Image: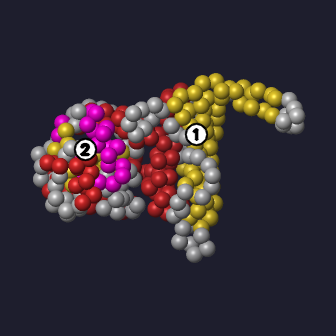
Amino acid sequence: MKIGFIGSGDISRFHIDALINNQFEIEAIGTRLNSLRCLQLAESVNLVDKYCSNGWEEVLTKDVDAFCICVDISKTPKILNNVLKIGKPVLVEKPISFHLNDFEDLTKDPMKDKIFVGYNRRYYETVKTLKGFCENSIEGGTVFANIPDSITGYKQFLSNGCHVIDTLRYLLGDFEILKKVVRHSKDQANVFAISALCNNEKWSILINAQSKIPSNFSITVNMEDLVYELKPLEKLTIYKGIEVIEPNLEEPIRRYIPKINNSFTELNSFKPGFDCMYKNFGKFVRNNLVDFCDINDARKTVEICWELISK
């Protein structure tokens, strides 16, 4: 299958490696007019003869089976709208846009079913394993999601925190926000802490997001007599039971240590989730039913993100 690739940022190489591993042939690559960075990327992956010096608009003139868009989020909606006019399947990097009105237009586009949104965390084996446990649970339980970040700001939460929000929706189904506390900077220009209580029919969910804290992204699911912890999302640890350690000279207090029942780690020679994501995209291009994030799904995740950070 031939692909038109639009992008040249740091993540582009991960996309290209996974594309090639899944038998996609990159027929064209371009971004901005005469982009030196894109040319250098093309050289690094032996695609100089496929480089489009006239940018992404030239990529759209090529005879391909599908497109991939991974450019700056502010540029994504315009390029995506032009790709949809061609009527070919397209994988587009999340979250597509910061603005909900862009999603409003995209969800009405007659070619909206051609959009495959690249939320790669959905394709982690750790996440898919936990999803199976969650779906099999009759009573549900409680969930804690921790979303730290080294960078503050609305856009950072929308572009990076959205991964955890999408993963929560993928694992648990849609949920509503019951109550939240949002802390903004003194000038109100940035959000730096969010606490929110959410739920649906099976799950009670506590979301904590705060920048500049020494912590890791994590999702912890408590159900029945087990604790399932994604921390980081690439590692799933299952706990059952407690080991009691009596006080000693080194630690003069009684300790209660959860016992590890099982653990799984995401092992892949590609960026986690990318190889499986492109296996599914290949099936999508061939019109086979696959597990993927569509435009309505992507819109809902951004809607929840905005609900969380709004005043």
Residue 27, percent from left and from top? 16, 44
Q: Residue at x 58, y 46 (%)?
A: 216
Nearer to me, 260 or 51: 51
Which of 32 and 293 lies nearest the eye of the viewer? 32
Q: Is residue 184 above or below residue 162?
A: below
Disc on res. 231: 1
**Residue at left offset 27%, top offset 33%:** 22
- Region rendered in magenta: 1-22
Residue 220 marker:
none
Q: Quadrant of residue 80?
A: bottom left
Asked if the stretch drawn in magenta spans residue 28, the answer is no
Q: Residue at x 81, y 29 (%)?
A: 245
Q: Of the residues shown, which amino acid type is indicated by label 2?
A: Val
Reply above or below: 244 against 116: above
Is 169 left, or right, of 8 in this rendering? Answer: right
Q: Label 1 neighbourhood size at 10 Å, few (<14), some (14-19), many (20+)? A: some
